[in-house]
Amino acid sequence: MDIIREFALPADREAAVRSQVEQFISSNDGKRIALVTSGGTSVPLEQNTVRFIDNFSAGTRGAASTEYLLRQGYAVVLLHRHSSLLPYNRRLRPHNAPWNFIDLLNVDSNGSITVDSSRVPGVADMVEEYRKVKAENRLLLVEFITLHDYLGLLHLCATLLNGCGRRALLYLAAAVSDFYIPNDKLPKHKIQSQDGPLNLTLGLVPKMLQPLVHDIVPNAFVVSFKLETDVDLLTKKSRQSLEHYGHQLVIGNILDKRKTEVTLVTKSAAEEIRLTDEQVEAGAEIEEIIIAKIAVKHETHIKSG
C-alpha cells in the first residue's frame, strides 16, 4: 500500500497547514523544534460520517509534555485531537475536578471578572508563561479528528521538519487506531439498522513509524510510546520496537500506572522513572521528568552529528 496516497490530505487543507508550519519553522530558525502528537484518532464507518470507532484519549500526556518542552526552550508543533486537552488550558480542566471553569469566575459590582485563583494554584504564573510563549511564537496548534487526518498531517509536518535536521524531535504520544476501513471500502451513506446486524471487516492501519525514521525525518530524534498490561513484557516489547523501527527511544507504560511510572528504553539501557507518594501528593507530573531526560538525550543526539 502507498501510505502517502491512501492518507493524502485535501489540497486546500494541505496548503493551509503547509503555510502555517513553514512560517513557524522559519520564525524559530536555529531552535530545537518538537512535533508532539496527542489525543486519539477516530475511524469513520461511512463517507458521510454518522458512526465511527474512536480511540479515546484525553491528551493529558501530550499537553503536559508540550508545556515542559516549551520550558526547555523548544518550539513545538502540537498535532492534537480536536477538543483534547491543550497545554496551559488543561489546568483549567483538571480531571475529576468538582467544578467547571465558570465556577472559577466572579463578577464584581463594576462588572469586572476575576478568577478564584485558590482553586487553581499557580494560575497567574501559568497565564504569564502562556503569554510569553505566545509572544515568542513558540507554539503552533494543528488539529485532527480522523485517522486519515492524523496520518496525513503527521506526514506533512514531519516532512517539513526534515529541514531542521538533528534539531527536530518527534514525540509520538497520540493514541492511534490499529484498525480502519480503507477509503474504497467505506459506504457512502449512513449504515441502516433496518438491514440487520452489522458485520465489519477492518484492515490493519499501516505503520507510519518506519517511513518516518528511515525516509521522512532520518536525522530527527524520535520518541514513541508502548502501552502494555503485563510488566514482564514491557521492556522486551519496547526493545523489539526499537530494533524493528530503528528510532532512538521508547517510553514504556503499564496501563494502570502510566501516570506515575514509565520506563525509558534505548537500545542499550532501560531506565525506570517512578513518582514517590510525596511527589504525587504535591502535584508533581511525571512528564516534567520525562522531558528533562529527553532534552538531555536530544542534545547529545544533536552534538553527535
Image (cartoon, rainbow, N blue to C red):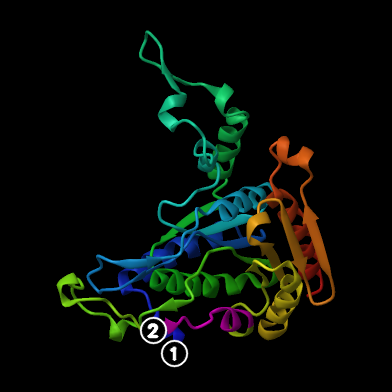
Q: In screen coordinates, is 269 left or right of 112? A: right
In the image, 30 versus 18, the foreground residue is 18
Look at mark 2 in the image and give the residue it sits on: 6
Residue 235 image point, x, y percent? 76, 72
Where's the C terminus, which quadrant?
bottom right
| Range of residues picked out in magenta | 203-213
Residue 220 image point, x, y percent? 66, 73
Observer able to see residue 72: no
Q: In screen coordinates, is 28 left or right of 147? A: right
Q: Quadrant of residue 239?
A: bottom right
Point out the residue furthest to the top here. Answer: 109
In the image, 23 versus 245, the foreground residue is 245
Q: Which disc number belongs to residue 52?
A: none
Where's the N terminus, which quadrant?
bottom left
- Does 57 sit above or below residue 230? above
Q: Which disc number belongs to residue 2?
A: 1
- Does 110 sit above or below residue 168? above
